[in-house]
Amino acid sequence: MKVIVTENKIQGGAKAFEIFEKGIKNGAKVLGLATGSTPETLYQNWVESDLNCSDLISINLDEYVGLKPDNPQSYHYFMQKHLFDKKPFKKTYVPDGMTEDVKSFCKEYDQIIKDNPIDIQLLGIGRNGHIAFNEPGTPFTSTTHEVKLTENTIKANSRFFDNIDEVPKSAICMGIANIMSAKKIVLMAFGEKKAHAIKEMLEGEISEEVPATILQKHPDVTVICDEAAAQELDDKYKN
Ligand code: PGA
């Protein structure tokens, strides 16, 4: 994995945008996108750029079960607000958190990913090493599935809700096999709370107990972290 350490998340977002822009100019058409605090500086750079997105397809990692797309806490809403309203894409896919048949929906989503192989996949990382909502213990062979959120993830995400009881208890999420099928992966992490997960991801034993460790097996991963997230890493990673 290639590691890029930036001073802060503003510079990290600019660096991530550079990679996406270069990839798109070189022909990338299908982007796997992510939500959360981490990608915000990337999307800021994106909307301020003159990059034309009208030929691009995006496939998002996940969505809460039970939230309508117009709910401000939904990941649909996040993507519209931070990127798609300002940079229209040819087609955008975000899992349907309101589907009445989650199992069939997950199969359809897998088919969408098969039909539109992802050129560049964006990821964040959880403090416990989760990628998207793939929590510790998720099989590396998993495809799109419904996830029961752990107490820790519910607690971490409650900062976006009025109170913790409003945080949905489950989500629809691309599986680890879907993520690994992307041609290129860009993982961003900012802040000291991510430092241990970053160290484990790069140097820990590959284990389903730390989902991000599977990325050691992917041939093209770039990790962008700020100095705080890189604080447990040896100097060899620092540029
Ligand atoms: P965050 O979430 O970007 O809001 O820190 C990342 C994650 O938990 O995957």
Image (cartoon, helix red, strand yellow):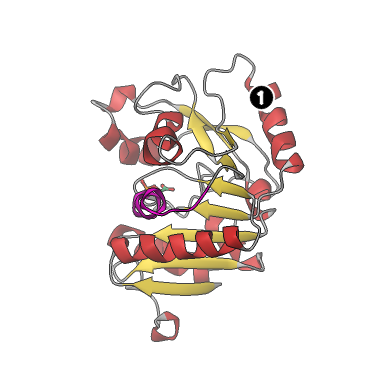
**99 over 124 or under it: above or below:** above
* Pointer 1 residue: 105
Q: Quadrant of the C terminus?
A: bottom left
Residue 114 location, quadrant: top right
Instruction: Please provide percent x and percent y for residue 198.
Output: 43, 65
What is the three-letter code of the residue carrying label 1?
A: Phe
Question: Which residue is at a point 60% across and 13% down the rendered structure image?
Answer: 100
Residue 72 location, quadrant: top left
Q: Quadrant of the N terminus?
A: bottom right
Secondary structure state at the residue bearing disc 1: helix
Instruction: Please provide percent x and percent y for residue 75.
Output: 44, 33
Asked if residue 133 lies left or right of residue 217, the reply is left
Q: Main secondary structure of the magenta part?
A: helix
Q: Residue furthest left?
A: 162
Asked if residue 177 lies left or right of residue 84, the reply is right
Q: Which residues are magenta?
A: 40-52
Q: Is residue 55 magenta?
A: no
**117 over 74 or under it: above or below:** below
Residue nearest the observer in this picture, 194 or 138? 194
Question: Which residue is at a point 53% across and 18% down the rendered structure image?
Answer: 98
Question: Which residue is at a point 38% across and 40% down the rendered structure image?
Answer: 82
